[in-house]
Amino acid sequence: MTPFLDLTDLEIAYPPRRVIQDVSLRLECAGIGCLLGPSGCGKTTLLRAIAGFEPLQRGSIRLEGVELSRPGWTLPPERRRIGLMFQDLALFPHLTLADNVAFGLRGWKPAERRARVHELLRLVGLDDEAQRYPHQISGGQQQRVALARALAPRPRLLLLDEPFSSLDVTLREDLAREIRAILLREGIGGLLVSHDQFEAFAFADEIGVLREGRLLQWDTAYHLYHQPANRFVADFIGQGVLLPGRIEEGGRVSTELGEIDGLSPVNCAPGDAVEILVRPDDVIHDDASPLSAEVVERAFRGAEFLYTLKLPSGARLLCLAPSHHNHALGQRIGIRLDIDHRVMFRRENG
């Protein structure tokens, strides 16, 4: 089956620096994805290449089997059937909301243009605000107008370059879910660029983690969290610590908190030093446990506290505990490990 979006062995360079190196990914059946990573990792450059604004030095980009880019040739952006939603939104302040949405529909018959604008403003919940101006509505409403404008020409794929970054965290995630629902309803694929993993989780079916121009893992949020491909992904996605351990006979791993069974990293043997990924939900508060740790930080999360705990060796763990367990800084509490997904890496520098 032909992938909806297919990026193959992409390389993009601003000589002498290679910004994107050997990136390949597939988005299936008008799916919804996200490119996630720290600032400067190449996310926006990759998005611009898909849109047709950056040439390729190597590889190819295809949408629904149609080639869009290859070295030495790029299909013009206006012929790609790709919509764009940028960080600055770029709404025209002197145009009404209806006229902003209609801006990309030049060449349409007036009656068709009016019907499409009305349809989209209703879709994003702003049909009663059509004659207002951008400065007269909220930031979240402006995002919806920008979405409606991007969807107006009926693109097959919508590219979103950190469009929610100016909004507060809760509104970002809510709007990401709303836009996801609209894209699914319209049958349009989506690819979001973000540095916020919770925004990515709310929006995307598949997420790619980039670092220094390389795609480290393209996977579901569940697998990125529970089965990270390497240390960087493990550290970037979710919260957790890498607990030192040593491989024993039979594949068990001895740690400061006892022995843990699990799959050893490739090319590891008994006696080798490893690190085990321990998430906050892997550390259970248990007053009956013989193991204890000191509370050195705590963050109230409503139903839960996120405790930072110090072990006798000085190593630290994170623990989520119900908020009716209200422990003071400096207090020692009983803990035990309950790790369902065992992720280990060979310890660097032994």
Image (cartoon, helix red, strand yellow):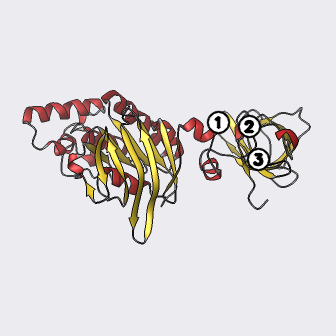
Labels 3 and 2 touching (C-beta < 8 A): no
Residue count near mark 1 (Cα–Cα under 10 Å), binned few <14, some 14–19, many ≥20: few
Residue count near mark 2 (Cα–Cα under 10 Å), binned few <14, some 14–19, many ≥20: many
Numbered circles on residues, count: 3
Give me the C-alpha separation between circle 3 and circle 2.
10 Å
Give me the C-alpha separation between circle 2 and circle 1.
19 Å
Residue 10 marker = none
Q: Which residue is identified by label 3?
A: 317
Report the side of 204 relative to 250 (left or right).
left
Q: Which residue is identified by label 1?
A: 302
Q: Residue furthest right?
A: 290
**Position in image of residue 322 (x %, y %):** 72, 33
Q: Amino acid at mark 1?
A: Gly
**Position in image of residue 42 (x %, y %):** 45, 58
Q: Earlier in the sequence, mark 2 or mark 1?
A: 2
Residue count near mark 3 (Cα–Cα under 10 Å), binned few <14, some 14–19, many ≥20: many
Q: Secondary structure at mark 2?
A: helix
Report the side of 349 relative to 86 (left or right).
right
Name which quarter of the figure residue 114 lies in: top left
Report the front residue among 191 and 95: 191
Q: Amino acid at mark 2?
A: Asp
